[in-house]
Amino acid sequence: MLHIVNKSPFERNSLDTLLDTSPGGAILLIEDGVYAATKGNAFEPKLKAAMDKFKVYALQGDLEARGIADRVTDGVAMVDYGGFVDLVANNKTNQSWL
Amino acid sequence: MSTIKKFMFVNRKAPYGTIYALESLEVVLIAAAFDQDCSMAFLDDGVYQLKKGHQTKGIEVKGFEKTFGALEDYDVEKLYVDQESLAARGLTAEDLCVPVEVMSRAELGKLMDEQDVVLSF
Amino acid sequence: MASIEVNGKSYEIDEEGYLVNLGEWNEEIGAYLAQTENVTMTEQHWEVVNFLRDYYNEFQIAPAVRVLTKAIGKKLGADKGNSQYLYELFPYGPAKQACKIAGLPKPTGCV
């Protein structure tokens, strides 16, 4: 399953709950969700620990808009809008966490 | 001339994901244009607003990082940033696009108490 | 939405006559918008209009009149950085009129 998260981990617990509940799959961080994938932030250890179960992606345009494309957590793959579409198409189901 | 009040704008939201950050900045400029004594506080995800290097072309949204640079022209020079919020996000004052005063949450709270008007975004 | 026609091309304007897409602006459009404001453009007018465009490029906003006055004084000298000079050039408000001619949105803080 592809999980899409669009909220900052500091403002909402969507990502937190997703990591606690899902057995694994792919996570795409978009909009304010991309803040979870920055080096040195307090949520980073939890995201890193989840990386053996999840492949984590972050939307490039949203990282660039927020000035953080140069400090993305190691192991997180940047994707563009085309990559977004591929992820949705290649996963049987997807869930947008609000 | 009407009386001048101490306004503080409290910013706790990340930029671009919601409209709050841009709205706050516009209201600050309006209040400042009416000669009010304005300051801005940044805490929680609000500190992300000041992260330098916004490139908003890809999301087709007008970027407003540059507008923080105009605050000085509007005599808005009191920009306060919460140290704890920066640290939790792996940021330091060097990552920010304008000069700010970094302080503790308690110091920020004290400043809020001293205002005539506090607007929260 | 309303539009204006300059040199055979049509450009969108908002209900108050401000150009919608500032990227479309050129001097002919500026001159046309000046006419609608009954302003006869001189070198001094263009100086203010160009100053506003530069300011917008740098800070992404059209400055309020007090800020404009101060900033012009800093850059072009005190004889130009005062409201009397600017109101003589743009009688219905330097920020409002000059911004319109410059193809910028209405200044922030302008009601």
Image (tube, coloured by chain):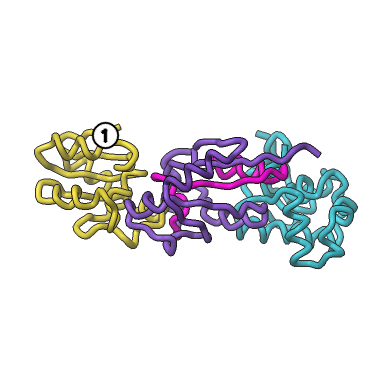
Chain colours: A yellow, B purple, C cyan
Q: Is residue A13 magenta?
A: no
**Viewer-side residue, C65 vs B58:** C65
Q: Residue at x 67, y 52 (%)?
A: B74
Which contiguous range is marked in magenta? B24-52
**Viewer-side residue, C88 vs C45:** C88
Residue C1: in sight, yes or no?
yes
| Residue at numbered disc 1 | A96
Left or right: where A32 falls relative to B18: left
Image coordinates of residue B111 in percent, x first then y, are 53, 44
Amino acid, disc 1: Ser
Q: Is residue A77 above or below residue B19?
A: below
Instruction: Name the image quarter holding the N terminus of chain A.
Output: top left
Neighbor class of circle 1 (other Cα within 10 Å; few <14, some 14-19, many 20+) is few
Left or right: where C46 falls relative to B21: right
Left or right: where A84 falls relative to C82: left
Image coordinates of residue C70 in percent, x first then y, are 76, 58
The quadrant in which residue A22 appears is: top left
Q: Residue at x 60, y 55 (%)?
A: B77
Q: Subunit of mark 1?
A: A
